[in-house]
Amino acid sequence: MLGPVILAASRSDRMRRLISAAPVTKQVVERFIPGETVDEIVPIVRELTGRGLELTMDVVGEDITRPEQAAAARDAYLELVERLGELELGARAEMSVKLSMFGQALPGGHELALANVRPVVEAAAAIGTTVTLDAEDHTTLDSMFAIHEELRKDFPQTGCVIQAYLFRTEADARRLAAAGSRVRLVKGAYKEPAEVAYQQKHEIDKAYVRILRILMEGEGYPMIGSHDPRLISIGQELARRAGRKPDEYEFQMLYGIRGDEHLRLAAEGHRMRVYTAYGTDWYGYFMRRLAEKPANLRFFLRSMISK
Ligand code: FDA
């Protein structure tokens, strides 16, 4: 019940101001977003890759209102690529981007987001890595998929995310499960209406398995984005049945969630990529993490009261 309320708050400016200013927030936020600057995140990148994990790096931010902010987002990612280049990690550290941060919702936003994200994808390719386009709310997806298709003409390794909770996703998965594609499947983190999305956990989980089967049986590279132990075992079984070798799919989880499981899967010889977010505009990302697990909210509120 709490999840939808928190997701609604994640889009409220008033709540954003209130929560961002709370004195204890930073300590709680750090569990999921372990740095605000590229200098703070580089040691974490070294540590995680040193432990055999791969990374997808996210500069937090979304729902911007001015084109200058989109240009600033592009520049923040370009700075990140430069620093990753110095670490010579190649495809072990890729990037995830939200097109809303690149201006997608502004007037002329489709073209603006494409123009801003292209240099990042180009710079990533120059250091031997790539970019995955995150999936945001359902109203943004046609534009995201069109930008993905456009970028793939020059950078075929550009990935995208699909969300199991949306009715449309089985059809998207069929279209995307082609040779050379890289597709991350997640359950979906936004508040979506019943006209477009499953609302019940068991329906979403069933859809996840159906869609994962399509990706595993297809010719692309599936990226299993979930912390759900049941879906992880099913993913392993589907990969085995499809005759995939360990380097022909990967698991992905978020920094700060089930960290032991990241290491366990990597130690078992799986490719395990950790989605690692950093930056100052963490509100939307943080609130979605609270919404996914109400116990997180209780912990957050307790830490505010005990201060
Ligand atoms: P589920 O929510 O059922 O969680 C399974 C178990 O994992 C829980 O029982 C709990 O133990 C643990 N867990 C999950 N979330 C937790 C949390 N916040 N705090 C503490 N424990 C938690 N969504 C989207 O809409 N667009 C996107 O682009 C992405 N990108 C993305 C990348 C990666 C790498 C991951 C792993 C996830 C995303 N997501 C996303 C988020 C995704 O849609 C979903 O909301 C979360 O992954 C939670 O769903 P699970 O599959 O983990 O299952």
Image (tube, rainbow, N blue to C red):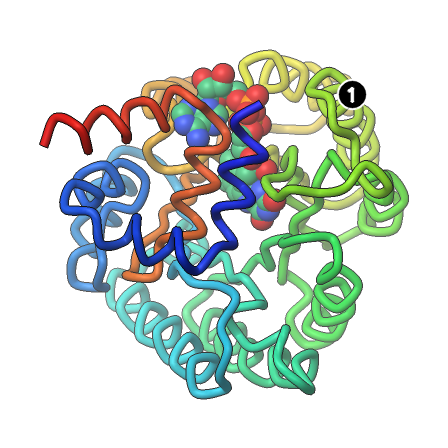
- Image point 36% across, 47% down: which residue? 276
Q: Can you say whether 136 is above or below 257 in the image?
A: below
Who's the residue at 67% across and 53% down the image?
137
Q: Residue at x 66, y 38 (%)?
A: 185
Q: How many marks?
A: 1
Q: Where is residue 222? Give x, y as percent.
A: 67, 39
Q: Left or right of 180: which side holds 17?
A: left
Say which residue label 1 marks.
203
- Disc 1 marks a residue whose amino acid type is Glu
Instruction: Classify residue 44 as left or right of residue 141.
Output: left
Q: Position of residue 116 (x, y in %)?
A: 54, 82
Q: At which x and y percent is residue 135?
A: 64, 53
Residue 266 visible in image: no
**Can you tell me whether the CB of the residue at mark 1 lies under 8 Å from the nearest atom of ligand 1?**
no
- Give whichever of 8, 100 is nearer the camera: 8
Image quadrant where residue 123 sits? bottom left
